[in-house]
Image (tube, rainbow, N blue to C red):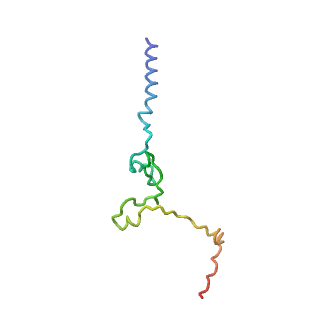
Amino acid sequence: MKLRTDSLLAVLLLLASTTGCSLVLDSSAEQCATDEDCVRFGSYPVCQEGLCVPSGLGPPGCFRGEPSSEEQYRNQCTLAQCIPFDNCARLGLCDGAALPPLVPKP
């Protein structure tokens, strides 16, 4: 009787361990149904065909939506990107070199 109880307990534990993950994890193929479902990923992704994809909007913390105040208008999200200018490579201003002299007025 002891062997049968141990075997039954082992089978129950095996079944519980295999179904436990499916109860905790979402195994559906779709990540989202609306853009609001993607908010948890940050950086303003959008929902396309059930997947959250980057929207390209930024910078972080910008206002997304229709602005109703001057602050919201100034902080609206945009697709613009900041591209740094390399003074060393483009102007030869490496290692703290001085600026070239100004061009005199004509």
Q: Residue at x 59, y 87 (%)?
A: 105
Judge by depth and name the residue closer to the eye, 28 or 101. 28
- Quarter of the image with the C terminus is bottom right
Q: Residue at x 43, y 52 (%)?
A: 46
Find residue 4 and report its horizontal and vertical position in percent. Answer: 44, 14
Find residue 76 and report its horizontal and vertical position in percent. Answer: 41, 63
Q: Is residue 100 above or below residue 73?
A: below
Q: Residue at x 48, y 53 (%)?
A: 54
Find residue 92 and report its horizontal and vertical position in percent. Answer: 66, 71
- Residue found farthest to the front: 49
- Quarter of the image with the N terminus is top left
- In the drawing, does residue 83 fall left or right of residue 28? right
- Residue found farthest to the top: 1
Q: Residue at x 43, y 31 (%)?
A: 20
Find residue 49 and report its horizontal and vertical position in percent. Answer: 44, 46
Q: Is residue 40 above or below residue 56?
A: above
- Residue found farthest to the bottom: 106
Q: Is residue 38 above or below residue 95?
A: above
Judge by depth and name the residue closer to the eye, 93 or 6. 93
Figure label count: 0
Judge by depth and name the residue closer to the eye, 14 or 35. 35
